[in-house]
Amino acid sequence: MDGSELKKQWKTGKPSFGTWATLADPAVCAILASIGFEWVVVDGEHCPFNPETLRNMLWVLRERGVVSIVRVRANDETIVKQVLDWGAEGIMFPFIRTADEARRAVAACRYPPAGVRGFNPRDASNFYFDVEHYMATANDRILAILQIEHSDAVNNLDDILAVPGVDALLIGPADLSFSLGAPRQFQHPSVQAAINTTIHKARAAGVPIGMFWRDTVEGYKAYLERGLTFIPLGVDYEFIKTEGAELLNKMRA
């Protein structure tokens, strides 16, 4: 699967599940891909990836047919350019607050004249063996995903959703709750109202909408019923922590 296929899947509204990679080891991506996740978000905003490790993680995901999405640390076209050249199929932009910021994000993911991406897709085009195919598909296949994690973004949502080329939104409830004065109070009325507004407006605009948070199966199902299109199910270190703690506690008991 590549980014264009994932876009089509998300547009159908059928629930789609991926996960989050934070541990700086390509083997982690190999394991997550083998589990069967359709896409993996590699967290380059908060986690300690050096360029070589990130490149190798993207390679592993691509070879296993899993769509790689990198959350970059900033809405910076030079960072985006490198990550796309290494083979990422999507970019997730944190803390988008305005339509102007959304336009900058989309432009960083597209070659001219549609955007400002610089040219040298070495890894992404299989070292230029497949460059003609890559260039013919790149602008359509690269996912530009904007994070809605501040009250300003919710207030500006109509303008953000009107920006051409926005492929999906991801709600970040933790930072959203901080911006609303209710830190980590995810059931606070103002937080839930902002989440509901974002889901409703994204759905009305035909833009796939997801959210990242930890919940039970019942909790995830409830949000799917509220209109989410895609959900990252957990984080790599949580899988280790949960399974390890459960087994250890059972044996100690």
Image: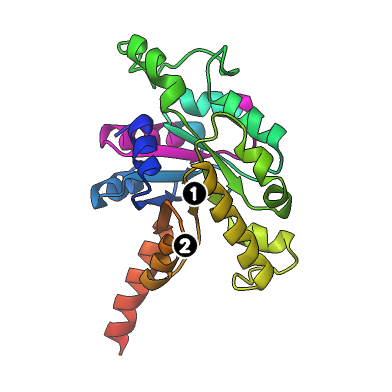
Q: Is residue 76 above or below residue 187?
A: above
Quickly name the residue at label 2.
Answer: 226
- Left or right of residue 67: residue 175: right
Distance from Cα at disc 2 to Cα at disc 1? 11 Å
Query: Of the numbered discs in the image, which one, if any, rests on residue 104?
Result: none
Residue name at image x 69 percent, y 36 percent: 99
Residue 181 position within the rendered picture, expressed as x and y whole percent measured from the top left: 75, 66
Is residue 59 covered in magenta? yes
Q: Is residue 246 above or below residue 123?
A: below
Closer to the chain start, of discs 2 and 1, is 1
**Image height of 151 relative to 183, above or below:** above
Question: Which range of residues does the magenta coloring cover?
Answer: 53-78
* Residue drawn where x is 42% and y is 20% of the image: 138
- Front residue of 19/208: it is 208
Label 1 CA crowd tier, 10 Å (few <14, some 14–19, many 20+): many
Q: Amino acid at mark 2?
A: Arg
Amino acid type, mark 1: Ile
> Toward the viewer: 141 or 79?
141
Residue shown at 67%/63% (left/top)?
Answer: 177
Q: Which residue is mark 1?
A: 209
Secondary element type, mark 1: strand
Q: What residue is shown at x 64% (from left), y 34% (from top)? A: 102
Tell me the mark number nearer the camera, choosing from 2 and 1.
Answer: 2
Q: How is the image coloured?
A: rainbow
Q: Horizontal placement of 175 versus 168: left or right?
A: right
Asked if one can make out residue 48 in the rendered structure from this viewpoint, the answer is no
Front residue of 24 and 176: 176
Which quadrant of the figure has residue 86? Answer: top left
Badge 2: few (under 14), some or many (20 or more) residues near its Cα, within 10 Å?
A: few
